[in-house]
Image (cartoon, grey):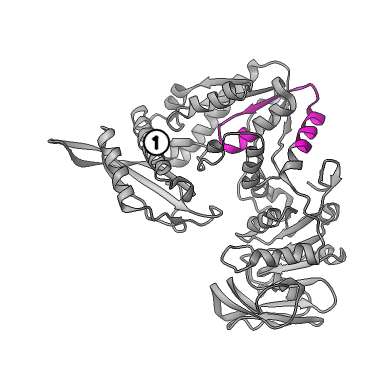
Amino acid sequence: MSDLSVNNKTIDTILVLDFGSQYTQLIARRVRELDVYSEILPWDIEEEKIIKLNPKGVILSGGPNSVTDSYTPRVPQVIFDLNIPLLGICYGMQTLAEQMGGHVISADKKEFGHAELEIVTDSLLFKNLNRKINVWMSHGDQVQDIPDEYELIALTSTAPIAAMQHKNLPIYAIQFHPEVTHTENGLLILKNFIFNICAACNDWKMDNLISSRIEDIKSKVGNNKVLLGLSGGVDSSVTAVLLHKAIGKNLTCVFVDNGLLRKGESDQVMQTFKENMNLNIIKSDNKDLFLRHLENIDDPEQKRKIIGRSFIDVFDAEAIKLKDINFLAQGTIYPDVIESSGSESNEARVIKSHHNVGGLPEEMELDLIEPLRDLFKDEVRRLGIELGIPKEMLDRHPFPGPGLGVRIIGEITKEKISILQQADNIFIEELIKAELYEKVSQAFAVLLPVKSVGVVGDERRYAEVIALRAVETVDFMTAKWAHLPYDFLEHVSNRIVNEIEGVSRVVYDISSKPPATIEWE
């Protein structure tokens, strides 16, 4: 992703050096919201990659380590040798202070949450800010002694050195997190760093991106044929339409219906992309195969593996039937790349291995094309809007790869799938009708592995229990349960119990993440 260009013009880059913070991706996204390209690299990446990236400035992320311990992450020397602006955030500030000759200690009173920051020295970083602002802290260590050649610029009641700057060089460090929405004017602080200090150009724009990507695809693919596994999700859908605009009928999409999709989803995908957008799509209906492989399986991890392996088998079978395919396209996006980038790090901190399709036969020898691999999800959605994909498809809540297979707790059967599809459809339908769908980040129904007694009319019913789940979140790393109105939940519950014969009771999940996960399995 280095030497990135749009319409043959090299664009400015802000490097985010990752020390393991949960907010690292958020920092990069905030930079891109300002129409400036940002890239994340692990702190121990090879120096040549940093030099090749040629960044206009570097942001040092926070992280879970303590600089008071031995052998913890440090800023590589090449960052200082580049003589470009630096901004250290949280751990980034602490390791910067320690490496420059200052002193960091474990604080007696740790700061987690809101704090009032008082700015005591004029600084370009805090230009156009009030002298006192509310910021978001999350740290156990703090700088006790400022390094030589640095000066204090801000403090809080419990952190006497909450921000500092070099007296002569464009190096800044702050203890709080400007990237989170909880910090007042946090985006303005990042703006000051990016534009006033780094002098970066805001040339990372969606309208330029489409024409540039289409030209890149044409150049790479030529007159060859491309195969894409289309799931109907945002990433694969945008990939499909972008490729279609570039190479037309030389793109073949394979849509695998595993029977674990939402109600009506299979027909919707085919109508949207085959009939309305004229894409070349093969539908592979394999509901019975997936059900057969999942018979008597109730372990969630085993279910995931079976669904993934079965998908690969079906996709392989369809791919082998096709002739003269030269490229495999995937809807890989930047968070997938970041989470798989442990291989680039000397410590190999792999969170997960990412395979959108994976496992294709070696004899196919396909080259890979991933036109979205440097984009965040919100950028992919913006690209999708520009490409003319219906907004209702782009704004749909996230749906797990194994589909309803991980929302049916326990063994999966045809009857359970039907019950859950109906319940989930009622919940989503009512959220949309009540104008609540876009106010929650993710909502769905779960079929529990228990039965409960109910009374419908004059009859006793011993049937399934449905749990409803709705959460609000910015980044899906943390989430709080959505406080949906009681009368709305009552209405949804009544509809589910009255309209679905196999359900006797509805419950609402009020667990936040953490400690719970968003999905149940």
Query: Residue 29, relative to residue 316: is it above or below?
Result: below
Q: Residue at x 46, y 50 (%)?
A: 518
**Residue 10: x, y in percent?**
85, 47
The magenta segment is 211-238
Q: Which residue is mark 1?
A: 425
- Quarter of the image for residue 223 reads top right
| Towards the viewer: 44 or 372 | 372
Note whether residue 356 is visible.
no
Q: Residue at x 30, y 50 (%)?
A: 487
74 left or right, relative to 438: right
Residue 214 point in image, percent of width and height: 76, 33
Give the total number of marks visible in the rendering: 1
Residue 383 position in % (x across, y down):
66, 40
Is 322 situated left or right of 326 in this image?
A: left
Label 1 amino acid?
Asn
Instruction: Give the residue drawn at x 72%, y 68%.
Output: 88
Q: Where in the figure is residue 458, as x and y percent of width and height?
A: 12, 36
